[in-house]
Amino acid sequence: MAKRVAVVLFNLGGPDGPADVEGFLRNLFSDKAIIRAPGPIRWILARVISRSRAASARENYAKMGGGSPLLAETRRQSDALEAALAAKGLEAKCFIAMRYWSPYVEDAVREVADWRPDEIVLLPLYPQFSTTTTGSSLTEWRKCGGPAARAVCCYPGEPGFLKAHAEKLIQVWESGGRPEKVRALLSAHGLPEQVVKSGDPYQWQIEETVARLKPMLPPEWETEICYQSRVGPLKWIGPPTDDAIRRAAADGRSILLSPIAFVSEHIETLVELDDEYREVAEDAGVHVYLRAPALGVTGSFVDGLAELVEQTLADGEPIRSHCGGRLCPAQWRDCPNRRPMVEAW
């Protein structure tokens, strides 16, 4: 009899409606992986920040119908992945584990236990590892009593993931009339600089993704990494996406923007990229501003996820990257993968 495989999809989560916005923000900023302060101080800060930002956040969610589309998008990805795994002959069921809103990680732990799988694979919908995303979710799985499982730590160079990004970028360029003088701005969510300096490999993995994506794009395109969504007084990694847009405008470039670290449409893509940064581009005099969609249920991306699950089961180790071994150089000490480094991946 075939083994029953539970695949747990980790993601951020988002409010279902306007009444949930403040609670969602409070959950987010209460996470010690996000605000690295002692518990009492962090809880006070989370309450203050969530209250102060709730009104503006509700306005942004109102542009998307009042709540986040992330859960619906993740459900579509879950369904597509189940179908891809079934095509491989695996009896697999996907469970959604959101970090800051329902269905929470604790809900997924309970549902997985009720289903009684033979194997469990923890699969983050964050391709590049960060302590603030995948790391936080893996910690929460253990904290909630999640059973022993095999985990995928990262897949910044997974072939299907890269192919899907290349397909989306080229498709939007072609549908936009194949503009000339393209600068592809590959925008990732930012992090405070101190998080990276402490050993978080996220920025390094973003750079690796782009290095492997670039040969798949038209050679005449320029490419630039940039970072969005910065908040608060701390110095964040850069360059900021809005500054990159202004530089591209000054250089007379057509902008092709891609959410390089996001695999689902949500507030950072539908509002920040489509509305706020488009306004920045128009004010700066950009004549062409195109935005590639998030990967969603693109076939090559979903097939890549299915490959990750299959390889993780065959590998038999508790944690692996898309190449099996550790990807990150030694200085990135927050990488959770302690296996030997893959020298040429």
Image (cartoon, grey):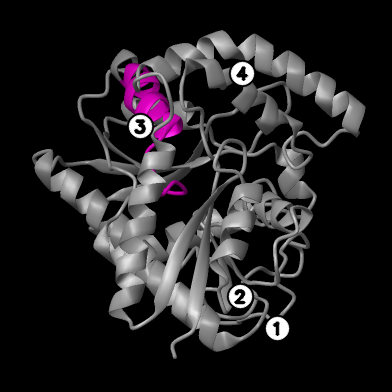
Q: Looking at this rendering, what residue extends furthest in the front direction?
A: 114
Q: Amino acid at mark 2?
A: Arg
Q: Amino acid at mark 3?
A: Ala
Of the residues under marks 4 and 1, which one precedes in the sequence? 4
> Is 298 placed above or below 223 here?
below
User: Where's residue 2, x and y in %?
Assistant: 44, 87
> Is 15 placed above or below 174 here?
above
Residue at the spot of label 1: 340
How many neighbours does mark 3 have within 10 angstroms: few (below 14), some (14-19), or many (20 or more)? many
- Is disc 4 placed on a helix, strand or loop? helix
Q: Nearer the viewer, mark 4 or mark 1?
A: 4
Q: Amino acid at mark 1?
A: Pro
Asked where in the image residue 256 lies, by quadrant, the reply is: top left
Q: Amino acid at mark 4?
A: Glu
Which residue sits at x=35%, y=23%?
64
Is residue 254 located in the magenta-colored stretch of the structure? no
Mark carried by residue 22: 4
Q: Looking at this rendering, what residue extends furthest in the bottom direction?
A: 1
Residue at the spot of label 2: 320
Of the residues under marks 1 and 2, which one precedes in the sequence? 2
Q: Report the side of 318 relative to 222 (left or right).
A: right
> Is 201 placed above or below 32 here?
below
Residue at the spot of label 3: 248
